[in-house]
Image (tube, helix red, strand yellow):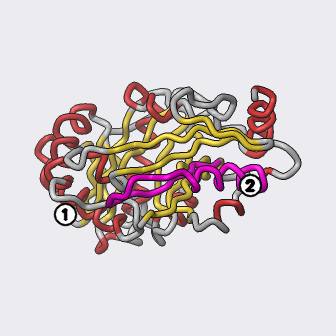
Amino acid sequence: MSDLIKDHAARVRSAEPLLAGQDDLPAKGELLEAPDAVARAVVDRLDPDGLQACWSPLTVHHLRARVAGSDPEAALGALLDQWLARPRPAGPEQALSVWWPSRDTEPVRALAVRGFAPVTVVAARRLRPGTAVTSGFTAGSAAGPAAVRAAGADDLEVMARMYERLVAYDAQFGWVTVRGRTGELLRAYLSEEALPLEWCWLAELDGRAAGFAVVQPPARSGWISGGVNDAPVAYLGAMYVEPRARGLGVGPALTETAHRRAGAAGVSTMVLHHALPNPLSAPFWNRRGYRPLLTQWVRHLR
């Protein structure tokens, strides 16, 4: 098994050196094996009243796989067939999920032909640590009169309402879910966790709130930084621009402010999630210099 995983990691590393975490297999979960392939199958069951339940279905069956050999597609396909054949209790809001290195494309046809679709990406951008930061950012003439400032407690309500609109927009693409307590939970997250860290920004256009950004600094990004072959890592957890302000430079002004703040704090890589089917996200983040590291392939169970 160790040689198989080493071969998998070497293939992935040649395609994407920035991606880490491929040279072992989680200890947790049911072990599945096939020729040139090994995986762990685990199940996450979420509290429907918790914030995590806004980001996915309530029950998610995960396959964490490593494949090698001359035909990685066939190896992954054999694992998937074993996994799909496993009996699962009936119930609402269940889905299958496989995260796969985005640039390791040779195996992924095995997912597509079995009904999986790519829905989410973890993307990364290298920063310049030590970059100077100012108290705010005003976009230049090409970006319009968007001003960005640090957000404070007085901005909670306007930020929470925009955050709710962000979640509602992403829910259209089938993975994020608006729940009865979503608004309440987002307010609690902003007031108790995000705003006190002072890594939140509000964009204003013509004196009105036009967008916001929230970043988790390195001390809060350990849950995702292990997948990045760099350090320190910060996580851009949310960025939203009001529809009336899109195309006016608000998004670039927010991200530039976040990048400058992170660079000044010594961050060398910023990572984020975005929805692949979202027609706004993928082109925007690509233009901001982000490239995909991991792609989540999913299949909903009925």
Instruction: Tell me the residue that label 2 is attached to.
Output: 107
Residue 288 horizontal/vertical position (percent): 54, 55
**Sequence-wise, which precedes: disc 1 or disc 2?**
2
Which amino acid does the dot numbered 1 rest on?
A: Arg
Compared across the picture, whether 280 is left or right of 241 comes to right
Q: Looking at the image, which residue is at 26% across and 38% down?
A: 194
**Residue 146 versus residue 193: which sits nearer the camera?**
193
Q: Is residue 150 above or below residue 167?
A: above
Q: Which mark is residue 208?
A: 1
Instruction: Report whether residue 130 is seen.
Output: no
Instruction: Report whether residue 194 is seen.
Output: yes
Residue 86 horizontal/vertical position (percent): 54, 51
- Which quadrant would the N terminus be assigned to in this image? top right
Residue 96 horizontal/vertical position (percent): 49, 55
Q: Looking at the image, which residue is at 59% across and 50% down?
A: 83
Q: Is residue 183 above or below residue 261?
A: below
Residue at the extreme right of the image, as rendered: 70
Disc 1 residue crowd, few under 14, some 14–19, many 20+, Cα 10 Å = few
Disc 2 residue crowd, few under 14, some 14–19, many 20+, Cα 10 Å = some
Q: Determine the secondary structure under disc 2.
A: loop
Q: Determine the secondary structure under disc 1.
A: strand
Q: Is residue 107 above or below residue 172?
A: above
Residue 173 horizontal/vertical position (percent): 41, 68
- The magenta stretch spans residue 2: no
Q: Looking at the image, which residue is at 37% across and 58% down?
A: 90
- Which quadrant would the C terminus be assigned to in this image? bottom left
**Residue 195 versus residue 108: which sits nearer the camera?**
108
Give the residues drawn in magenta, as a range: 73-100
